[in-house]
Amino acid sequence: MGEYSKALSSHEQSLEINKIALPPNHSFLATNYNNIGSVYYNMGEYSKALSSYERSLEIRKIALPPNHPVLAQSYHNIGMVYNNTGEYSKALSYYEKAHEIDRKSLPPNHPHIARVKRNIKNVKKKM
């Protein structure tokens, strides 16, 4: 709906509640940071998005198994930020990490695999 300030406020409130109620590396906190990052990403505030996505990834690396598909989501989101800021080699690196996890954890015809492959192809064209 484009109401980013309301979305951001809601996600930040959720994060603050979860920080009180949950252990510091709980996967819900990672989801909160990811959601905040997505709002910033959609607002075009890529440095803030990157910071939130990186915090989400840090927690997910601790809270989840190494080939969990949600980890791939974090790598993909960071890749999207780098792609949009013109840092194509970093974007490619993160997309490739996402693709590696997706291939191990999802069925071969899963749409996430196709999406990441498409993004890898597109970023290589820009390099």
Image (tube, rainbow, N blue to C red):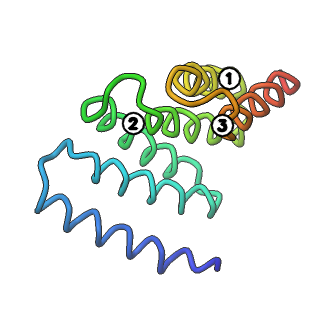
Q: CA distance from mark 3 to mark 1?
A: 20 Å
Q: Is label 2 in contact with label 1 (beta carbons under 8 Å)?
A: no
Q: Are marks 3 and 1 in contact (CB under 8 Å)?
A: no
Q: Which residue is located at x 88 percent, y 24 percent?
A: 125
Determine which residue is flagged by label 1.
Answer: 92
- Distance from disc 2 to disc 1, alpha carbons, whole Å, reads 17 Å
At numbered mark 3, what does the secondary structure look like: helix, strand or loop?
Answer: loop
Q: What residue do we see at 37% from left, 52% from top?
A: 31
Q: Where does residue 98 sit, x and y in percent of width and height?
A: 56, 27
Per the rendering, the mark at residue 110 is 3
Identify the disc placed on residue 57.
2
Residue 94, how many percent across, how many down? Answer: 58, 26
Which residue is at the front of the view, 6 or 74?
Answer: 74
Tell me if 50 is positioned left or right of 108 in this view. left
Quadrant where the image shows the N terminus? bottom right
Horizontal side of 16 relative to 84 (left or right) equals left
Packing grade of label 2 (10 A; few <14, some 14-19, many >=20) is: many
Label 1 sits on what residue type? Leu
Mark 3 or 1: in front is: 3
Mark sitting earlier along the chain (2/1): 2
Q: Which quadrant of the figure contains the C terminus?
A: top right
Q: Nearer the viewer, mark 2 or mark 3?
A: 3
Three-letter residue code for mark 2: Leu
Q: Which kind of residue does numbered mark 3 sit on?
A: His
